[in-house]
């Protein structure tokens, strides 16, 4: 009797792992689409962002207790709001422009995607390093771009996709445990 229960629980675990892998691959695909759209057109589809937000949020939710997921997401979104307020003030007072003339709506939505997709420490690390990555890549390749604006959501998508792949390939790394 115990062996039968053990076998059923293994099937459930394998099924859960398979489902998680499929969702992770779908998220990486979505991030690739965001990267392509932002590089090519300097705009990203809201529907693709919403799908990415749902997949990333689901993966994070599955890795956490519900209250931990909610509190992490809230803290991350408060951080995004603070960053956005600083950008808004800078655009208004220093540059004398509307915030969305200097910062894309897709970039803001991607920040929210990051906020619900990762626990606090992973979010902060991915957010900060993806900003550095984006500006480094743009600085090195800006002569190849016809547009002078940074495709921030696209480059951050590429960075997050790379982080998710490393997280999957290197067993000692778990971005959901930070």
Image (cartoon, grey):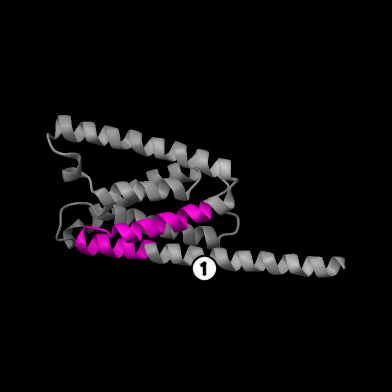
Residue 102 in the figure: left or right of residue 66: left
Q: Quadrant of residue 3?
A: bottom right
Residue at point 50%, 59% (across, down): 166
97 part of magenta stretch:
no
Res 174 visible: no
Q: In which quarter of the image is residue 32?
A: bottom left
The one of 168 and 19 positioned closer to us in this rendering? 19
> Which residue is painted at 23% across and 48% down in the image?
104
| In magenta segment, residue 35 | yes
Secondary structure mostly seen in magenta is: helix
Q: Position of residue 49 (x, y in %)?
A: 35, 57
Count of numbered circles on the image? 1
* Residue 111 in sight in this render: yes
Q: Is residue 5 left or right of residue 88?
A: right
Q: Residue placed farthest to the left in the image?
A: 96
Q: Where is residue 56 in the image (x, y as percent from the top left)?
A: 46, 55
Q: Is mark 1 on a helix, strand or loop?
A: helix
Tell me: residue 42, above or below residue 87.
Answer: below
> Disc 1 designates what residue?
22
Nearer to us in this view, 39 or 21: 21
Which residue ends up furthest to the right in the rendered image? 1
Residue 33: image x %, image y %?
A: 33, 65
Instruction: Tell me the residue at 40%/35% (across/down).
Output: 78
Classify residue 14 as left or right of residue 35: right
Name the residue at 52% across, 68% down.
Answer: 22
| Residue in the foreground of this view, choosing between 94 and 47 | 47
The quadrant of the rendering that contains the C terminus is top right
Label 1: few (<14), some (14–19) or many (≥20) C-alpha neighbours in 10 Å: few
Q: What span is in magenta? A: 31-60
**Quadrant occupied by the N terminus:** bottom right
Residue 37, image x and y in percent?
A: 26, 63
């Amino acid at each position: 009797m115990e062996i039968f229960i053990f076998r059923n629980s293994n099937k459930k675990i394998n099924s859960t792992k398979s489902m998680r892998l499929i969702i992770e691959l779908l998220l990486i695909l979505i991030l690739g689409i965001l990267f392509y759209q932002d590089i090519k057109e300097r705009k990203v589809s809201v529907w693709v962002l919403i799908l990415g937000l749902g997949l990333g949020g689901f993966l994070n939710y599955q890795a956490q207790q519900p209250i931990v997921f909610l509190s992490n997401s809230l803290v991350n979104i408060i951080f995004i709001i603070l960053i956005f307020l600083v950008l808004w003030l800078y655009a208004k007072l220093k540059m004398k422009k509307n915030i969305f003339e200097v910062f894309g709506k897709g970039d803001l939505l991607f920040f929210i995607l990051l906020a619900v997709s990762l626990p606090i420490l992973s979010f902060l690390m991915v957010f900060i390093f993806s900003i550095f990555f984006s500006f480094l890549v743009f600085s090195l390749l800006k002569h190849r771009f016809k547009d002078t604006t940074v495709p921030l959501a696209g480059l951050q998508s590429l960075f997050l996709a790379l982080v998710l792949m490393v997280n999957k390939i290197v067993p000692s790394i778990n971005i959901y445990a930070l």
